[in-house]
Structure formats: structure tokens, C-alpha cells
């Protein structure tokens, strides 16, 4: 199984999450400080070794095969937010 990085330009259903989006408000437990109509929902992580990761959240549709029983699968999809 070959894994690749997510490329938003390769998705017709992906979009950046705005800071006014319910997801962002819930994540930050209320209104996001400095949120404007064009601002995006950002993340910033600092790991134990001091390295960091920052960026913007994306919402897209993930398509997968779900197990339906008796060793059979059927196509399914779900909306996911990730950063």
C-alpha cells in the first residue's frame, strides 16, 4: 500500500475551513479571537522534542470500503476535517 500526502488541488470536494465554521468554534471552545470573514481555521502543535507543526484545517470527503458482513464490502464516504 503506497501512501501519499494529501494534495488539495487534486480534490474536487476539499475546502479550507474558515475560522467562523462551527468546527473551529467548537475546537477553540467559542468564538475565535481575531476571526474575520476571510480568515481560516489554523492549528499549531508543539511536540515534546520542541519541533512544531502549523497549518490550516481542511474538510474533504473520504471514500472507503466498509465491511458489511460475511467478508463483503460496500463503498461508503464521510466528511472529515484534518490538518
Image: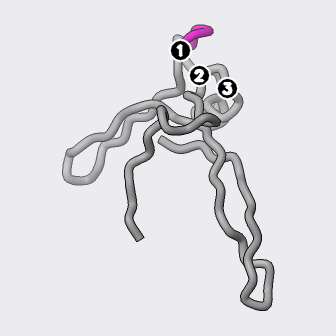
User: Is residue 3 found left or right of 47 in the rendered image?
Assistant: right
Query: Which of the two labelled residues, at mark 3 and mark 1, occupies the earlier sequence position?
Result: 3
Q: Nearest the camera: 8 or 17?
A: 8
Label 1, on which residue? 39
Label 2, on which residue? 19
Measured from the top left, where is residue 22 in percent x and y? 71, 30
From which residue to which does the magenta span run?
35-39
Label 3, on which residue? 21
Q: Label 1 vs label 2: CA separation?
A: 6 Å
Measured from the top left, where is residue 25 in percent x and y? 65, 29
- Residue found 40% across the figure and 32% down from its top: 55
Is the residue under label 3 in contact with that under label 2 (CB below 8 Å)?
A: yes
Asked which secondary structure carries label 1, the reply is loop
User: Is residue 5 found left or right of 51 in the rendered image?
Assistant: right
- Residue found 79% across the figure and 79% down from its top: 68
Is the residue under label 2 in contact with that under label 1 (CB below 8 Å)?
A: yes
Amino acid at each position: 500500500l503506497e501512501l501519499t500526502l494529501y494534495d488539495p488541488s487534486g480534490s474536487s470536494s476539499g475546502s479550507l475551513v474558515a475560522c467562523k465554521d462551527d468546527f473551529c468554534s467548537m475546537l477553540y471552545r467559542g468564538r475565535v479571537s481575531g476571526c474575520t470573514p476571510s480568515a481560516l481555521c489554523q492549528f499549531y502543535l508543539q511536540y515534546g522534542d520542541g519541533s512544531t507543526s502549523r497549518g490550516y484545517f481542511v474538510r474533504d470527503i473520504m471514500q472507503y470500503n466498509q465491511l458489511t458482513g460475511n467478508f463483503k464490502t460496500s463503498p461508503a464516504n464521510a466528511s472529515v476535517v484534518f490538518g
